[in-house]
Amino acid sequence: MHDKTLAELSTGLAGREFSSRELTTETLKRIAALNGKLNAFITITEERALAEADAADARRAAGETGPLLGIPIGHKDIFCTKGVRTSCGSRMLDNFIAPYDATVVTTLGQAGMVTVGKTNMDEFAMGSSSETSFYGPVRNPWDLNAVPGGSSGGSAAAVAARLVSVATGTDTGGSIRQPAALCGITGIKPSYGRVSRYGMIAFASSLDQGGPLAQNAMDCAMLLGAMAGFDPKDSTSLEQPVPDYTANIDAPLAGLRIGLPREYFGEGLDARVDAVIQEAVQTLQRLGAVVKQISLPNTNLAIPTYYVLAPAEASSNLARYDGVRYGYRCEKPRDLQDLYTRSRSEGFGAEVKRRIMIGTYTLSAGYYDAYYLKAQQLRRLISNDFRLAFEEVDVIIGPTSPTVAFNIGEKTADPVTMYLSDIYTIAVNLAGLPGLSMPVGFVNGRPVGLQIIGSYLREGQLLNIAHRYQQETDWHKKMPSGMLG
Ligand code: GLN
């Protein structure tokens, strides 16, 4: 049962092949058996899960239907869950029991989904490897010595190891797409504003966006349809109807115009990854797509721009963790200053502190114009690159990550090398566009992800392309079973 997709589980529940209680019990067993190896979950919510499963079974017995009714899900530990520890991967929030549910959690709960636990992540979603968590690194189910990518690495590893069929993630600069790529699964970062950020712990508010991680595009479409939508509690939420993402997912690709940005295939891209991507592009061509080379000339500015803006926003968002209202508080503070200083020094890890210091610096009076303001101007140039490209092509395609999964510990000593892992994903957040990653092959037994970037609110088109590709290939069906017994 564990290897079934969301769609298959949904059919099984509807046909009374098994109950949500049975499915949830199986899921909890598999998590208990394998989480020790993977460290994908920080918290397992067994009691809540069984109660929700029983409630879903009762709703079904009363005649209710619904594709998500009774399906287990893992939530990234950045989404607030009422009565359940919500740590954001940080010692700062290790003792934080959220008093309310994030909108995403509420909405999926109303659709009947069963929360089985909270998934591990880089501390405050800052990272590309899921190694900065207070709860220790997550391991990649394809190779336990490899990172799963980050920051939604726990969610990606959980789906790849088939602990759950679907999980939620968030993406500020690549944190859904990059771990999806490194773990061989499918994930989509929606357009900015598509999914509510209410109750999603803030990292960089103008970039953060929640989305689904799943085995394939169809499952992402099913989950995204339930996650997306206007939320009056999030002032940047879009007041736009949510299409049925599964409705046209099968549409033929004939005539689809794909752009390959020359800047995404240059220096820094592993040649073996390049070869796998080229093969996937050929498959899309066979399906009727027309491929053309394009240019996104400001690509090299994406990382420096992001690493000014994201830390700036983070430094102000994280100012709330002061040891006073909630979260970690140091022992025996001498005075208020000591309380602030020690609570923050002891509660935050090294990467979070680095970002807070960079952000505070770039926002300070003497440097604001030179850094923050400049970065905002560059952000506009980067968005313009995409705007112009979408006058020529329908979607942009390239690798999600320049390399396959690297080894645990390989990049921790050099933060800049780590930041370069997001070279192809970050610009998409700066422009607020949707981006999807799907598995298209392997290099040395580690998965390769292909990224599809769309114009604003074109999530449906990305899912359609990925789904058509997945009808033709079976990369998304490969499972890291050898490793997990
Ligand atoms: N790796 C990027 C960072 O460290 C992006 C993280 C994310 O998308 N949450 O900021």
Image (tube, helix red, strand yellow):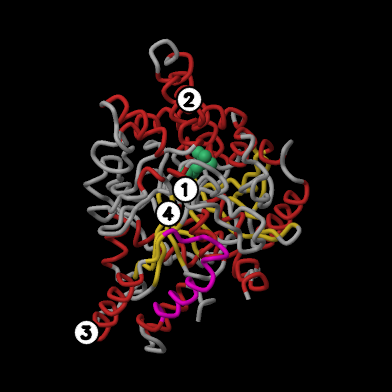
Q: Distance between the residues labelled 4 and 3?
A: 31 Å
Asked if the residue at tag 3 contacts the one at tag 1, i.e. Cβ–Cβ closer than 8 Å, the answer is no
Mark nearer the viewer, 2 or 4: 2
Q: How far apart are marks 1 and 2 (CA)?
A: 21 Å
The residue mark sitting in front, 1 or 3, is 1
Quick one: SS at disc 1?
Answer: loop
Asked if disc 4 and disc 1 are in contact, CB closer than 8 Å, the reply is no
**In terms of depth relative to the viewer, which is nearer, 202 or 219?**
202
Neighbour tally class for label 3: few under 14, some 14-19, many 20 plus, Cα within 10 Å: few
Q: Residue at x 48, y 14 (%)?
A: 370
Label the magenta part by its dominant secondary structure: helix
Tell me whether circle 1 and circle 2 mark residues in contact (CB < 8 Å). Answer: no
**In the rendered structure, which disc, 3 or 2, sits on the residue that comes first in sequence?**
3
Is residue 279 depicted above or below 291 in this figure?
below
Identity, as a three-letter code, of the amino acid under mark 4: Gly
Three-letter residue code for mark 1:
Phe
Cα separation, mark 2 vs mark 4, equals 28 Å
Q: Name the residue under label 1.
A: 134
Residue 138, by quadrant, is bottom right
Please give the residue where the numbered disc 2 appears in the rendered image. Answer: 358
- Seen in the picture, residue 12 relative to 309 is either above or below; the reply is below
- Magenta segment, which residues? 23-42
Quote the CA–CA distance across marks 1 and 3: 43 Å
Q: Residue 211: give its label.
A: 4
Which quadrant does the C terminus fall into?
A: bottom right
